Amino acid sequence: MHHPALATHALENFSTSLYFWWLAMLRCSKDYWWICRQGGRCEDERLVRIWELFGDIHTAGSVLPWWQTRGTNLFDSPQVEMEFVTRLIGQLLLVTDKTLAKAMPDMLCLAIPKQMTSQDLLLTIAQAWDLARVRGEHYNKGAPFKLSSVANKSAALVISAYRLSLLQVAVDHAVRGDEMYQWGGYEMGLHLRVSPKSKPRNRDTLASARKKQANIRTIYSQHKKAAAELIANVEIGIFPSKEPVPHMRRWTDRQQRELDHAVQSGAWQNAAWLQKEHAFMLPQSSFWQDGGDRLTAREQAMGMIDDFSQLRMPFLEPKRKRKPKVEKLLDQS
């Protein structure tokens, strides 16, 4: 039996994890798009392996069916970010792999005291789940693909790099008369808020304004370079990483000519790409129902891009919250 509420819950859980951005960056890969179009024909075995496991992510309809059919097997339930201690809140016990008779993919197993009331149970599970999202460590020992260990700053760069990739496509397809038509690195960086402290102010001197503009352009270029590095790594199953990827021939001469033609003719990342990407990755968004169709081209582009920033990102939260100074002093007294 299909349960829409469970499906929606699964999508919400997936969209709060870094694995969501793994898929998002892979969909930005021109070579992965092309191997999907080529039915897996490619001379780079690394890319072929990823295609065999991740499948054609460009014909999946939306992120949810892909997650249900492919993602859970690849990432081993990324929504479960749980600190694996024996006892949780309110007498709940976490059942670990040592006590389970068999693996339970995509499931978090709890032992619940029989005497608990339904109300106490729901409240306790909610508290334990919220705590786990902030303090948890993702248990993915058996997962085929694991996240690279990165600091919060590096994880945040993934989101910035992805948003930049979206905006770049929108700017590339802006028509004469659109506000974005002549945007360069400075304007894109400014609208993406890559450096809030460098935002120009009316009281800035000419020298200060130029310094801020240069800073925004520099950070924009860094984000653009990071996006290319992240995509190169995700193509071979490593994420998030900006490490150099050894070059390997991927296409025959004929395939390369056909790829170049496909790009030039607009088959790859065409004018409708941003809207399709938004619809695929954020199927629950109400952007268009809320009047997105009445906005200007710039407002539509920035609205869809900003929609990605509205997702909850518990992986950016500190694992251990610092105690206020007053509380620390009380502990020491």
Image (spheres, rainbow, N blue to C red):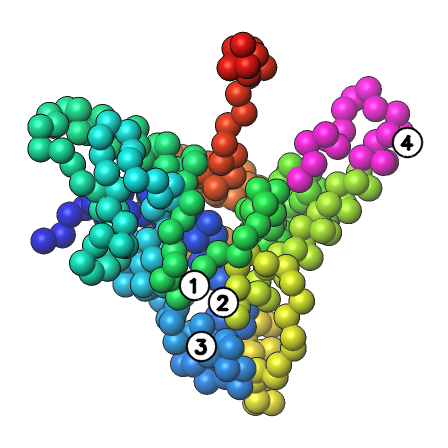
Label 3 neighbourhood size at 10 Å, few (<14), some (14-19), many (20+)?
some
Cα distance between the residues tagged 4 and 1: 49 Å
Label 2 neighbourhood size at 10 Å, few (<14), some (14-19), many (20+)?
many
Q: For the residues carrying marks 2 and 1, which lies nearer the camera in this image? A: 1
Q: For the residues carrying marks 4 and 1, which lies nearer the camera in this image? A: 1
* Residue at image location 65% in from the left, 75% down from the top: 246
**Amino acid identity at mark 3:** Arg
Left/right placement of residue 116 relative to residue 312 reads left
**Amino acid identity at mark 2:** Gly
Pointer 2: what residue?
A: 237
Cα distance between the residues tagged 2 and 1: 7 Å
Q: Secondary structure at mark 3?
A: helix
Cα distance between the residues tagged 4 and 3: 52 Å
Label 4 neighbourhood size at 10 Å, few (<14), some (14-19), many (20+)?
few
Cα distance between the residues tagged 2 and 3: 9 Å
* Residue 92 in the image, given as x and y percentages of width and height: 22, 34
Pointer 3: what residue?
A: 49
Left/right placement of residue 68 relative to residue 205 reads left
Residue 208 is a magenta residue: yes
* Residue 50 in the image, given as x and y percentages of width and height: 45, 72
Pointer 1: what residue?
A: 145
